[in-house]
Amino acid sequence: MIDHPAFTVEPWAVSEERLKLEVLAQTESVFALSNGHIGLRGNLDEGEPFGLPGTYLNGFYETRPLPYAEAGYGYPEDGQTVVNATNGKLIRLLVDDEPFDIRYGELLAHTRSLDLREGVLRRHVRWRSPSGREVEINSTRLVSFVQRSVAAIRFEVKVCDDQPLRIVAQSELVANEPNAIKTKDPRAASALEAPLDAEEQEVHDLRVVLVHRTHKSKLRMAAGMDHVVEKVDGIVTGAEAGPDLGRVWLTAELQPGQTLCFTKFLAYGWSSRRSLPSVRDQVDAAVASAKRTGWNTLVRQQREYLDQFWEHADVEIDGDGELQQAVRFALFHTLQAGARAERRAIPAKGLTGPGYDGHAFWDTETFVLPLLTYTQPTAAADALRWRHATLDLALERAKTLELKGAAFPWRTIRGQECSAYWPAGTAGFHVNADIADAVIRYVRATGDEEFEATTGLELLIHTARLWRSLGHHDHEGRFHIDGVTGPDEYSAIADDNVFTNLMAEQNLRHAALVASKYTDRAQQLGVDVEEIAAWRDAAAAIHVPYDERLKVHPQAAGFTRHKTFAFNGIQYPLLLHVPYFRLYSTQVVKQADLVLALYMRGNHFTAEQKARDFAYYEPITVRDSSLSACAQAVIAAEVGHLDLAYDYFGEAARMDLGDLMDNTRDGLHIASLAGSWIAAVAGFGGMRDFGGDLSFRPRLPNALSRLEFRVRYRNSSIRVRVRHKDVTYELVDGEPLEIVHYNETIVIDKPVTRDWHVEDPGPEPKQPPGREPRHRRVRG
Amino acid sequence: MIDHPAFTVEPWAVSEERLKLEVLAQTESVFALSNGHIGLRGNLDEGEPFGLPGTYLNGFYETRPLPYAEAGYGYPEDGQTVVNATNGKLIRLLVDDEPFDIRYGELLAHTRSLDLREGVLRRHVRWRSPSGREVEINSTRLVSFVQRSVAAIRFEVKVCDDQPLRIVAQSELVANEPNAIKTKDPRAASALEAPLDAEEQEVHDLRVVLVHRTHKSKLRMAAGMDHVVEKVDGIVTGAEAGPDLGRVWLTAELQPGQTLCFTKFLAYGWSSRRSLPSVRDQVDAAVASAKRTGWNTLVRQQREYLDQFWEHADVEIDGDGELQQAVRFALFHTLQAGARAERRAIPAKGLTGPGYDGHAFWDTETFVLPLLTYTQPTAAADALRWRHATLDLALERAKTLELKGAAFPWRTIRGQECSAYWPAGTAGFHVNADIADAVIRYVRATGDEEFEATTGLELLIHTARLWRSLGHHDHEGRFHIDGVTGPDEYSAIADDNVFTNLMAEQNLRHAALVASKYTDRAQQLGVDVEEIAAWRDAAAAIHVPYDERLKVHPQAAGFTRHKTFAFNGIQYPLLLHVPYFRLYSTQVVKQADLVLALYMRGNHFTAEQKARDFAYYEPITVRDSSLSACAQAVIAAEVGHLDLAYDYFGEAARMDLGDLMDNTRDGLHIASLAGSWIAAVAGFGGMRDFGGDLSFRPRLPNALSRLEFRVRYRNSSIRVRVRHKDVTYELVDGEPLEIVHYNETIVIDKPVTRDWHVEDPGPEPKQPPGREPRHRRVRG
C-alpha cells in the first residue's frame, strides 16, 4: 500500500515529483502504456533499477503443466502464463565513462507524468554522474491507439555543464530478460525462465528485428525497432544483433548545452500460425509505417483518438480533486486495456503486469464491458467476439464436464480453462451467465441486430444450454442450481447461489427470446420449440432462497445459518491467513455476491429487501477482492447511504493510485478501475438498464457539488449532470431519448432538469474491523 | 479384476496351481507376508519377472514436496511416500549356464500356496532350462510374528535329471530397485527414484549388512542377511557388498537327485534418530538371534502364534467354501497388517503394496480395529497408542486450521497431514470422531482403565475440543457442523453430514463422561466443568437433518433435494470418469455414509428409519470404495435382506482374491478384509456394543448352514454359533457374560441356545446399474 501521497493531484495527469524506489514496481504499473494489443510497463528507459520488467503482447503466452498432487478427472493439464516479451523500451546511456543509473551519482530532478489527454508518458531527469558530469534527459513514450502494432519513444539528452561530453546511447531489444518473481501469493504470476527461443535476427542500418518463438506454446513473435536521429556533428551510429539482443548505438561528443535527440519506433507482431517471414515482414512494415508517420504525427493522432474517447466517456467531478483524477486515470487505463484488444481477451490486469498469469476472468464482462458498452461500444463488441471465437473450446470443455452447451473458462488467455483449483474455478459457472449478461447489455445499448443475430445468438443459446443441464427441477417444480461457486470466493460449492441463479434466469429467458426472434438461425443450432420452452420454464421456476427468520436473502442455501466469522486477531487478505475450510464454513464474504445481485438483477428485489440485505452483508464483507467496492458503492447509493457509497467509489477508483490491495506491483486492477465508472454512473447516476427505458435515480453525497457523465445509448448520446438537489439530462448527439427519471418518463431532446430526493436510510452499517473504507466524506 | 478362478478353494490356504503372468502383480499382493512391522510382497525369489517389487518397513518413508498450481493457506507442503526398502527376498540361480527365469525354458510345474495356519508362503517349481536341464526348486518364506525384525527363506534346489549340474545361488540384498509406476490413478503411489543413499556395507562370512538413509526424510535403515547352508561336497561360498548390493554366493556341482539347501535369515532395523552403529548393530543382533533360533523353530513359533490367533478370531462358515477361505484369508491379512505394528500406523494397504503411498486413513479405526479389539485387543491398543504418539502434530495441525484441540490427518505415515486435496482430505474431519469411537469401543470391550485414564482420556478430550470449535449453535440452539466431508467422497464440503454429526455427538458425550470420571487428569489438560458442560450441551443439541417429504435422512443437509445422478453410459469407478463437480452436485454415493451411520450409531434410528434409509441409498451407492460393502452387508442383514447381506459379505471378503477393485496390484484392501469380519459378526451375528450389555440379533441367509465366530469381551471369551433357525452362545473362557439376545438378557455360563426369526422386509432394493454385487445366494 502506498501510504503517503505518491502522486500530485491534477485533473488530467498522474505525476510523480521525485523517484521513490520503494514503490518503483507500483509506479511501473501505474505508468504502464498500452492499447490493448501491446503493453509496456513504466520501466525506466535505462532498464535498471526495476520492480518488474514487462512488455506484454495480448494473447502471447507460454504453456506450463499444471501440477496436481492429487489429480481429478477433467482437471486442466496445462496452464497459460503471459510472457515478458522482447523488451524494446530499453535505452541505455553512457555519460563519459559512467553508465546512467539513478542509483549512483546524484539525482537532481526526476519527474514522470502520465498525460491522460495526450496518452504519453513523460520523464524528465537531471543527473550528476559520480564523476560530476551533469545531464538532462527527457523521454516521451507512447503506445499508439491508432497504429496498434506500434510504440515509440522520443529521447533527448542534453549537456548541462560547461565541458564537452562523450555520450553513447544504446537502444536495444532484449529477449528473455531475467526476472525473478518468487512468491506464495496465488494472485501473482508463475515465473518463467527464458521462454523464448531465438529464430532470426535482422539488421538494416538502424533497424533491427528479432524473431523468437515460445518454447512450448510455439507462438512466434517478431519485435522490431528503427530510429530517426537528429543531426549532430560527429555522430557515429551502428547496429548489431544476436539471438536475444538487438542493439543500435549512437555515439557523439556533445558540446555544453547541446542535445542528442532521437526517436525510437517499435513494432511487434505475433501469431500462432503464420510463418517466420510473414511475422517478420509484418513488423518491418509496421516500423516503416511508423517511421513514415513520424513522431509528431503519432503524438497528434494519439491526442485526437483520446479527445474522441473523453468526449463520450469523461466523468467530471466537482468537490474532490483526488477523485476526479482517480476516475480519469481509471477510465484511461480501462481504455488502454480494451481499446484495441480486438478479439483477444481483456485480462484482469490489462497489459500492465503479470499478475494472475495474465488471465482474463469474468471481470471483463461484468466490470469492464459496462463502461465500454456505454462509451466505446465497438470495443465491447470485440471483447464479446473474442469469447465467441473461443466457443469451440467452451463446447469441448462442457463435454468434458458432462454438461450441455458451452462452459467458458474461469481463467484463461487463449480460451482453455487454466484454473487448477476447481472449487474456486470451474465451479464458478456464473462466468457463463456474465457473458450472456454482457451480450444482452450490449444489444440493448446499441440495438446492434447484426451482432445479436450472430455472435449474440450463439453465445446466449450455448450458455442457456449449459444452465439447463446444470440445474434441475425439484418435486415442487422449483429450478435449482447446486454445488456452484458464486462471486464470493470465500464460499464454494454451494446450492442455489442467488447471484448465479438470477443471472442464469436472465440467460435462459433471453436465450428463449432471441431464439424465438431468429428462428431460422436458432434452428440451425438445433434449437426447437421444446428446448425454448424448457429454458423459459427453468427461468420462470428459478429458486431464490430466502431466510424468513432474518428476513434476508442468504447468499446461497444455508448461508445465513452458518457460523459467524470471528474477526478478532484477523489479518487481511484472509486468503493468505485463514484456511479455506474456515472461510467456506462461516459467514464471511470476500466480495459482493448477494449485493452484486441486488445491483445486476435489481428488479428482482424490493427496496426494503435491498436495504435489509445490504445491512446484513455489509458487516461480513471483507473486500479482499478489488471487484467488491464498486458493487457496494452502487447498492450503498441505492439504499441511501450516500457517504458510504462515496467512500466505496473512492476506493474503487483509487485501487491502484493508492495500491489498496498491496499488489499493484503485479499490475493494475482493471475491473476495479472500470468499476469506478459503474460506481459513478450506476451508483450516483442511479442508471439501470433492465429492459424498457433506460432509467436514472441520481443522487450525490454532500461532499460533491457536481457529477457529470456521458452515456451512449442506441442512436443517442446524452450527458447527465447531477448537482446537490437536481439533475440535468441533455442530448449531446443523435435522436431524442426516452428515459425514466425516478418514476417519471422523460424524452430528452433539449436539456431537462429535475429534482431528486433520497429518504434517510437510517444508521449506516458497519464493516468488518479493519475493513472500513477510507472516509472521504465531509460529514454533517 | 481376476475374472477366472485364480486360486483353489481350500479352508486353510490360498493356492495357485500354475503361474499366471497376467495377474502376477495381484498375486504378489495376495501372497504378501507381513507382521505389521516388515512386509514382503510375494515377488518371485529370483526377482524377475515382477509386477511390483516391494519390501516395506512400517513408518519408513520418503518425503516429497506436494505441488500446487494454486496453493492455499495451511495446505501441507510435504507428502510422505512409502519406500521400497532394500530387497532381501532375492535369490538368483544359475543352472549350468542359464539364469533361472520362468519366462525361458519350460515351466513343468509352478505352485504357490499361502498357508494361513502356518503363516508361510510355499513355492514349488519344476523347470527345464532352455538347454534341457531339469531342476526342482522349493522355497518357503516367512515373516516372523514372534521375532518382529526377522524374515527367513528356506531354499532348496534339486537336480531332476541324470547328469551332474553346476549350480550357483546368489542370495542378495538390493537397494534402490528400479520400479516404474506411472499412472494417473490417484489411488496408486507416486514413483520415487532411488530414494536411498548408501551409508555403510558390512561383510562377515555369509552375513552382509547394508545401511542406507533416505534422501530427504533422513530415515536410516539397515538390512542384514545371514545364511545357514546344508553341507554339500565341494560347495564354495563367498560374500561381497557394494553401496546398493549385498551378495552371498554358493556354488556347487550337484549330482543327480542331490539337493542344495540353505536358509536365508533376514533382518531390518530403521530409525529417524538412532545412529548408524546403533541401527547396524540392531540388525546384526537380530540376524544372529534368528540364526540361533533356526529355521525349524521359527516355523514352529509362527504356527503357535497363529494357533493362538485363530483360537480367538476364527470365523467358521458351512455352506460356502469359497467364502470360508476368503474370510480366513481376510482375517490372516488383517492380523499381518496389525499384529506387530506396535505404535506405528496400520496403513490402508498394510505392508502389501505401495497403493495410497502407504498412508493410513480412518480405515484403521473404523474397519480394522473392531476385529482387533474383539480378538487381539493389545494390537488395537497399540494402534491407538500410535495415534496418541502423533498428538503433538494433531494439536499443531488444529492450530494451523484455526481450530481447537487436535485435528488428526486424513492421510499420513508419520502423523503429518499429507492430503493435497483438502475437500476430500482435511475436510474429512470425521477421522477424529472415528479415533474417539475406536477408543470408546476398545475401553468398552476390554475395561482397560489404565488405557482409558491416559491415552484414551487425552484422545477423547482433544478430539472433543476440535468438534466444539468446529461446530456452533444456531438461533434455536441446535448444534451444527458445516462444510465438512463425510465418508462418501462423492460429496464434499456439506453441512450437517449425519454420520459426522452423530460420531461427533458420541465423541463429545464420551469426552464429558471420561473427563468427569478422571477429574484430576482432565484438569491437568485444562478441562473445567464449563468445558465439560459445553461438550454435553453440544452433544445433546446435535442436529440430524431429516427429509419429511421423503421420510429419509439426507446424508447431509440438502442432499435428497439434489439432482439425481444419470447412470446411463457411465463407467466405474466414477472418480476416473466423471468430474468432481457432477459427483458433488448430484445424488450419487461412493460408499456407505448415511448407511454407515445406521450401523455405527444404530441406536439413533428406528427400525423403520433404517429400512427406509437403506432402501433410499442402495440404488445410488456405487461402491467405488472398498470400504462400502461391509457396511452395506451389516445394514442389509439388520433390515432383513439376508441374501443381499450375504452378497456384500462375499464382496468384502473376496475384495482381493477376486481383485474386485481392479487395483489389488497396488496392495490389499485391508479395511475391506477386516470389514468382512464386521459383515459376519455385526451383520449376521447382529452384534452391537452401544454401551450396556453386548447384544446380538443373529440371522443367516439360506445358503449358509452355520456361521460360528468368537468374541473376547472383558474377562470373557465366547463363541457364537448361528444356524438356520437358532443360535448357541457358549462361554469358552473366563467369567460368565451377560448379553442381550434380541430383547432377552441372557447370562452365558454354559451353552445357551435360542431361536431367531427375521420378518420379511419386502422387496430387495436395486443397486446402480452395473453395480449389483455378485450373487452368491441360493434363491428360494
Image: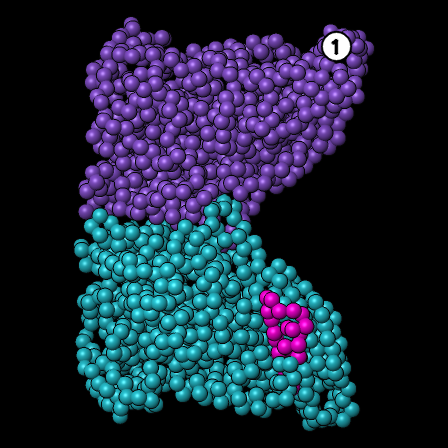
Chain colours: A cyan, B purple
Residue A127 is a magenta residue: no
Q: Which residue is mark 1?
A: B161
- The structure residue drawn at horizontal position 39% and vertical position 62%, both measured from the top left corner, is A525
* Viewer-side residue, A77 vs B564: B564
Indicate whether A356 appears above or below B460: below
Q: Which residues are magenta?
A: A263-284
Q: Is residue A281 magenta?
A: yes
Residue A509 horizontal/vertical position (percent): 28, 64
Residue drawn at x 49%, y 46% as measured from the top left: A71
Quadrant where the C terminus of chain B is found in the figure = top left
* Residue B144 coordinates in the image, percent (x, y): 56, 17
User: Looking at the rendering, which quadrant does residue A565 occupy?
Assistant: bottom left
Q: Is residue A65 visible?
A: yes
What residue is at 33 percent from the left and 46 percent from the top? B586
Q: Secondary structure at mark 1?
A: loop
- Seen from the viewer's position, the closer of residues B467 and B635 is B635
Mark 1 nearby-residue class (10 Å; few <14, some 14–19, many ≥20): some
Name, please, the residue furthest toward the right: B234
Q: Is residue A34 left or right of residue B709?
A: right
Identify which residue, B49 or A69, lies in the foreground: B49
Amino acid type, mark 1: Asp
Quadrant for residue A736, please give it.
Answer: bottom left
Whole-percent x, y for residue B96 in the image = 79, 18
In terms of depth relative to the viewer, which is nearer, A359 or B524?
Answer: A359
Q: Is residue A300 left or right of residue A445?
A: right
Q: Is residue A484 above or below residue B299?
A: below
One can see residue B393 in this view: no
